[in-house]
Image (spheres, grey):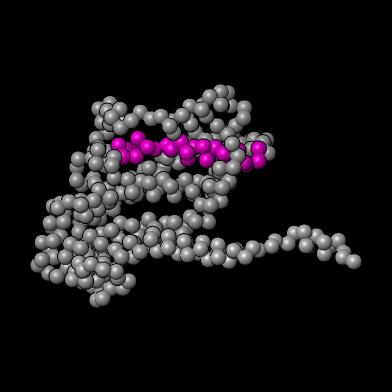
Amino acid sequence: MTTPSVKSRRKNRVYESKGEPFFQAALILIFVLLSVTFVYPYWHVLVNSFTTPAYASAAGFRLWPKEFSFDAYRHMFRASFLWSGYLNTLKVCAMGWALSLTGVVLSAYPLSKKDLPLRGVFTTIIIVTMFVSGGMIPTYLLVNNTLHLRNSYLAIVLPYCISTSHVIIARNYFMTLPAELEEAATIDGANSWQVLWKVMLPLSAPILATISLWVIVSNWNAYFNCLLYITDSKKYVLQVVLRRIILTDSKEMTMVAEDIAKNTDTDTVTLKAASIMLATVPILCVYPFLQKYFVKGVLIGSLKG
C-alpha cells in the first residue's frame, strides 16, 4: 500500500524523454557557436593590437599574438586627439546621464500616481512618441537654427535626452513600491520633494542603475549627432575620432603615422586595433558593477502596467 507522500512524489515526477539529452546537447552547441561568433571578432582585434605589423596584416585565424608588441598602444597613448575625444565623451556621458535621469524620474514618478488628473492621456501621448517622431530634418532645424546649439554638447544629448521606454519602465517600477511608505513619510512632515528624494529614489536603485547603464552606453557610442552638430574638431567625441582613424585618412592618423615612421615599424593595422580597444574597454568595465541591478530592474520595471 502506497502512502500519500509516495503518490504525490510520483505525481510530481518529471519524466525525461529519450530525445531530451540530444536537445540539451544541441542547445549547448548553439550557445557555444553564438558565443564564439560574438567573442572572436573582439578577440581578433585584441590580438592584433598586441602583435607585430607583419602578423597583424596576414590573413587567417589567430588566437594568440605571435610576437608581443606594445608599440601601437605606446603611440596611441601619445596621441593628444585620442585623449581629447575621451574627455569630450566623458563630458557628454555625464551631461546626458544627469539630464536623462532627471527627466525620466520627473516624468515617471507623477505618472505612477493613480490620482494624477489625465494620467491616461499623458501616458498615451508619451507612448505615441515611440512610434511617431518629428524626424531628423525638423530636429536638425530645431537644434541648429532655433536653439542655436551648434558646437555645443547639448546638441548631442538634448535631442534624445528622455527615452519613452525608460519613462515607462521607471513608471512601472515606481508603481510596485508600497504607497504606505509615502503616507508614513508625509505623516512625519515630509513634503513631496522630500518623499521623492529620501524615500522613493533610494528604493529605486535597481531601475535607476539599469537606466544609467543604458544612458551611459548610448552616449558613449553616440557619434551621429556629433557629425551633425559639431564642426569644431576639438569637440569631437571618441567615436567620431575612432571613425576618422579607422574609415578615413584623417590628419590625426597621418600625424600618428608620421611619428611611427620615425620611431618604429608599427603600421596602421595595429594602430586601428589599439584605438578600438582603448575606446571599448572602459565601457565594458562599467557593466560588472551594475550587473546585479540590471536584471532585477528590467524584470520588476516591466511587470506592472
* Viewer-closest of 166 and 27: 27
| Residue extent of the magenta highlight | 153-179
- Left or right of 257? Residue 302 is right
Please tell me which residue is depicted at 40% across the width and 64% down the height of the picture.
36
Please give the name of the residue rendered at 29% of the width and 45% of the height, measured from the top-left corner.
223
Q: Where is the N terminus found, in terms of image quarters?
A: bottom right
* Quadrant containing the C terminus in the rendered view: top right
Identified at 28% across, 50% down, the residue is 239
Residue 257 position in % (x across, y down): 13, 61
175 vs 213, left or right, is right
Q: Foreground residue, 117 or 273?
A: 273
User: Taking 33 as reference, is 72 left or right?
Assistant: left
Q: Is residue 176 magenta?
A: yes
| Picture layout, residue 168 above or below residue 30 | above
Can you give x and y, in whole percent of width and height, for residue 57 in the image? 20, 67
Residue 41 on the magenta span? no
Q: Is residue 100 above or below residue 75?
A: above
On the image, which quarter does residue 159 sit in?
top left
Helix, strand or loop: magenta stretch: helix
Residue 239, relative to residue 288: is it above or below? above
Residue 79 spot, x, y in % from top left: 20, 59
Please name the residue shown 25% across and 31% down the image. 144
Q: Position of residue 93 (x, y in %)?
A: 36, 47
Instruction: Tell me the quarter of the picture where residue 65 sits.
Output: bottom left
Residue ranking furthest to the front: 18
